[in-house]
Amino acid sequence: MTDHATPPGPAARQKFDTSVPHSARIWNYWLGGKDNYPVDEEAGDAYTAVFPGIVTIARSSRAFLRRSITYLVTEAGIRQFLDIGTGLPTADNTHEVAQRIAPETRIVYADNDPMVLAHARALLSSTPEGATAYVDANVLDPDRILAAAAEILDFTRPTALILSNILGHVADDDQARSIVTRLMDALPSGSYLSINDGSRGIDPVFEQAQDAYNESGAVPYILRTVGQITAFFDGLDLIDPGVVPVPLWRPDPTSPTPEPIGEHGGLARKP
């Protein structure tokens, strides 16, 4: 087994308060995970009382991640992943999905949340043939992420960049696009970009619930229009069916007919 991690930064060494709800733990709760506390369950239940569909969004987001990674490994032949904003580990993390299919796959996770870092040991597992690493770095510092990831990944080979529900934490649209551009510029031709994020224009109740959450003093998460999410893929070749509600992206043919939700995603190849 080959596991690596950069030394924890100052944020990673902070103690976290389990008496205050935490967005990563709430998301983990909605996904059915166990890395949460009663205060997180209470906050999650309060949100679902206003908008029960948030559980569907959380689980559809994870299902999109699983299907897109499966496509990348089986159809695109990708064997390297850079997953930024990983959140707390649950079932079917990037390395689990990819290495089940191709054990030699190498994955670098990046996050700067002290709660996530506290669970990094669960992320740092790998097949003997591959590698899994954790980088303590903020999405707002793409150069640090790239420098640390380059110790594990070979950026002369096609790599998949995974940005799952992380760009909503970058409020400024120009800054978010600049981050995506900087990260993709470091990857060679044949690399891929996978993005999924909460969206506006599908479900007004979801939008009202999220706006109220953002005004509560919690770490905000900004919903973007479909056009704004699609713009992150400028200059890349979108894979069919393009940027769509995540349940509609190459759905499992054995599943019930999917319905649109306020979470859009897509996958694109760098020419």
Image (tube, rainbow, N blue to C red):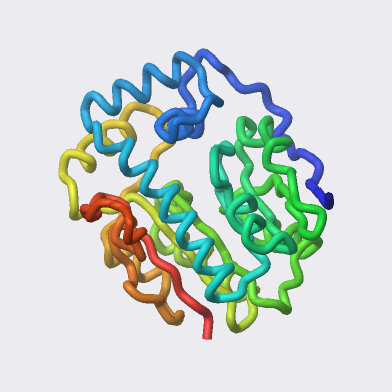
Q: Position of residue 253 (x, y in %)?
A: 32, 61
Residue depicted at 61% across the width and 30% down the height: 115
Q: Is residue 2 above or below residue 70?
A: above
> Is 142 positioned to the left or the right of 255 in the image?
right
Query: Total marks drawn?
Result: 0
Q: Position of residue 195 (x, y in %)?
A: 44, 61
Say which quarter of the image contains residue 252. Answer: bottom left
Q: Position of residue 242 (x, y in %)?
A: 33, 72
Residue depicted at 64% across the width and 32% down the height: 114
> Is 16 positioned to the left or the right of 173 in the image?
right
Residue depicted at 56% across the width and 70% down the height: 74
> Is 177 positioned to the left or the right of 147 in the image?
left
Residue depicted at 22% across the width and 43% down the height: 207
Q: Is residue 202 visible?
A: yes
Q: Position of residue 9 (x, y in %)?
A: 74, 39
> Is 151 positioned to the left or the right of 33 in the image?
right
Q: Is residue 11 visible?
A: no
Q: Is residue 36 above or below residue 77?
A: above
Toward the left, the furthest residue is 204
Task: Tell which of 52 and 259 is nearer to you.
Answer: 259
Say which quarter of the image contains residue 243. Answer: bottom left
Toward the front, the furthest residue is 254
Toward the bottom, the furthest residue is 271
Q: Is residue 66 above or below residue 219?
A: below
